[in-house]
Amino acid sequence: MIIPSIAFTQIEREQYQQDHDDKKFHFGISLGTNRAHYHFTNNPRFLQYDSVLVVESIQSTGINLSWLVNMRLGEHFDLRTYPLSLVFTEKAFQYRLKYPDRVLSEDSLTTRKVQGVTLAFPFQLKFSSDRINNLKVYMIAGGKIEKDFAATAGEKNAEQLIKLSKFDYGIEAGMGFHIYFPVFVMSPEIKLGWGFKNVHSRDENLKFSNVIDQIKSRTITFSIIIE
């Protein structure tokens, strides 16, 4: 609500960066914060055994740092990608245990955190409105491929971990505002991300893993893009 109101106060002012949107290519940097969690389904073993009573995915906060490349397709359409996009997250699972192992410092309510350092490659189609003085609204939709360098699928002796695969893919959708200033364009943007791949590398021998079947990522990201 604040961002459009600021921009609309410029209605009577000079229109900045008039040729910005006519360029075939333009570049930018993006800095953002994300809220991430996992959507999961329980394995039938969850109902067969009573050692784990409840499993929940806890939302956590991370940061995004990206380099933007935008290619103009037409008056209202652009193709965007991020050749270098780093995403830092920390997702967590909370378990309610019936028989906690005090030797392993477990409690009735135990949390297992999963660190993520992800190199993402999103590609998006952007649809923009007409420009109103120094403001333009846009929507985006597209796909993404990700590699998590901190994934634990190949690790052994990981009793305290949930093993995850390194690769993921999914879709993203969101919206934002271009606010034009004399020497740059600032774009606050919010988007949602849905992972399609089951990233769970299930291990029958791990009590924190064998009760879960599929794990899929979910994120919401707020970014500020400077072009």
Image (cartoon, rainbow, N blue to C red):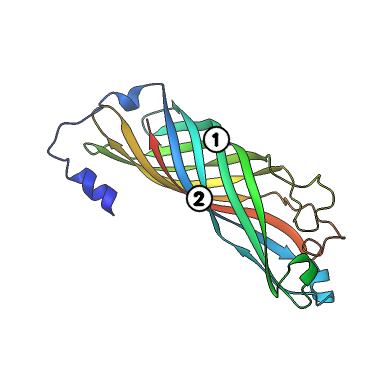
Q: Position of residue 196 (x, y in %)?
A: 66, 50
Inspect the image, locate mark 1, and give the three-letter code of the amino acid beneath it. Answer: Ser
Figure check: 27 above or below 3? above
Q: Is residue 95 above or below residue 224?
A: below
The answer to whether any part of residue 163 appears in the image is yes
Residue at the spot 80% in from the left edge and 77% down from the top edge: 50
Would residue 209 appear left or right of 126 to someone viewing this image? right
Instruction: Please state which of residues 178 and 97 is positioned toward the viewer in this rendering.
Output: 97
Q: Which residue is mark 1?
A: 85
Q: Which picture quadrant has residue 30?
A: top left
Residue 31 appears at what percent x and percent y?
Answer: 44, 39
- Label 2: which residue? 34
Label 1 Cα neighbours within 10 Å, binned few <14 / some 14-19 / many ≥20: many
Quadrant in which the C terminus appears: top left
User: Nearest the camera: 97 or 124?
Assistant: 97
Residue pictured at 71% horizontal, 45% vertical: 151
Looking at the image, the residue that sits furthest to the top is 24
Q: Which amino acid does the dot numbered 2 rest on?
A: Asn
**Image quarter of residue 85:** top right
- What is the C-alpha distance between the residues marked 1 and 2? 13 Å
**Few, some or many residues within 10 Å of mark 2 (<14, 14–19, 20+):** many
